[in-house]
Image: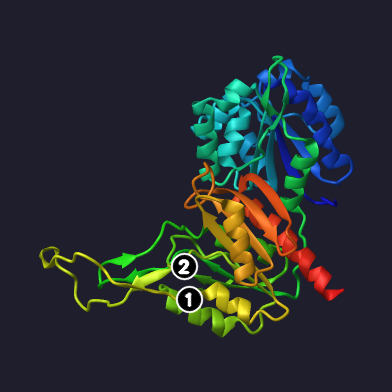
Amino acid sequence: MSLNGKRILLGVTGSIAAYKAVELLRLRTKGGAELQVVMTEAATRFVAPLTFETLTRQPVLLDMWSLAYSHRIGHIEATQRADLFVVAPASAHTIARLAFGLADDFLSCIYLASRCPVVVAPAMDCDMFEHPALQESLKRLRDRGVHIVEPDMGPLASGLVGRGRLAELSEILGVVERFLVPRPDLAGRVVLVTAGPTREPLDPVRFLSNRSSGKMGYALAEAATARGAQVILISGPVALPAPSGVDVIHVETAEEMYRAVLATLEPAHVVIKAAAVADYRPKQRADRKIKKDQAVSEIALEPTPDILAEIGKRKGSRILVGFAAETDDLVANARRKLQRKNVDLMVANDVGQPGAGFDVETNVVRILDATGGVEDVPLLSKREVADRILDRVATLLKKSAS
């Protein structure tokens, strides 16, 4: 892992796991990154600032009332040059301060001033971690795009056994690598992604649709671009900005998405169908708004085109990835869909599970493959889930080329 030229701010807070943050300095000694540590006052009760200063050869940012950068405002200067801000370990107190936008120490000021990605790795007792207030704070951070590295299960300093241990350092380092190290394993490939819902008009005002926000598909398009692919994104109506460097085709109905997919399918090496396409549409669309007093007792429906099945018929040597949003019998239903539609990978998620499904920043999925394998992907940001899916895609591409 080469991180030469990358600058990382490492936040250390008042958790018994603070001593483990010393190991994260491997990013400097092995990866070549420039590290600077910012500590809360509570963290200094566990590890002395001198330890980090000696190993990083940088002053520890601690006193927000000093001008740490030769008469320049410390928290502003620190964030202007940072590529990534990692808070590990993150105590319950610090997580709450970040979630509610407090700015009463150097670390919280840096968070509010940061324009780089932020990674937070909680570490605390299991009862504290499971408390609704803490979980609400984590949700606030996730909703703002902060990447949470979930803690592990195991014995804790309190003597209890539960979830709250700082995640393995290898996992934290892996997240850092995914953010900072470009992986051109999709260079020269064309990736076609569908995202968002479709809208099936009933009249000029009303339509049938679903709760999809498009965030998973947009994360896949963004991640594929970062890995060197030429990306075509066919998007239903969403409230998301177009990812940089992506060719976006906007559609509204299932029929429009079907036509757009077939029109752009030819050059694609990979097709990822993350869109939540309506299965049915009204048989008839009224030309004028249906008035309330017109007493519509039922709406006749007809099936929309099955886009995934059609791509499966025309798949050829392409890698095809489908999505299955389920509420019961997750793996069984997803496996049947994979086999029926000639898909290489099926990404299944239980939309009733907390943190998964529609209109949230995270997802919990299981990736099924055509050989019968199942990979469990834990609660992660949708961008991290996207990279897990693309890891599998890249492996399949490599096998097909050999």
Q: Which of the 4 quarters of the picture holds residue 237? A: bottom left
Q: Which amino acid lies under the numbered mark 2 shown in the image of this protein?
A: Val
The answer to whether the residues at label 1 and label 2 have Cβ atoms under 8 Å apart is yes
Residue bearing the label numbered 2: 277
Q: At 68% from the left edge and 48% from the top edge, which residue is drawn?
A: 376
**Residue at (74, 24) in percent of width and height:** 17
Give x and y (percent) for residue 384.
66, 51
* Residue 93 visible somewhere in the drawing: yes
Q: Nearer the viewer, mark 1 or mark 2?
A: 2
Q: Is residue 82 above or below residue 398?
A: above
Horizontal side of 7 relative to 144 (left or right) equals: right
Specify the amino acid type for callout 1. Answer: Met
Q: Earlier in the sequence, mark 1 or mark 2?
A: 1
Instruction: Give the percent coordinates (x, y) of residue 357.
Output: 51, 51
How many residues crowd around disc 2 within 10 Å: few (fewer than 14), some, or many (20 or more)? many
Q: Residue at x 56, y 62 (%)?
A: 217
Quadrant of the rendering where the C terminus is positioned: bottom right
Residue annotated with mark 1: 257
Q: Residue furthest left?
A: 293
Q: Would residue 281 appear left or right of 391 to someone viewing this image? A: left
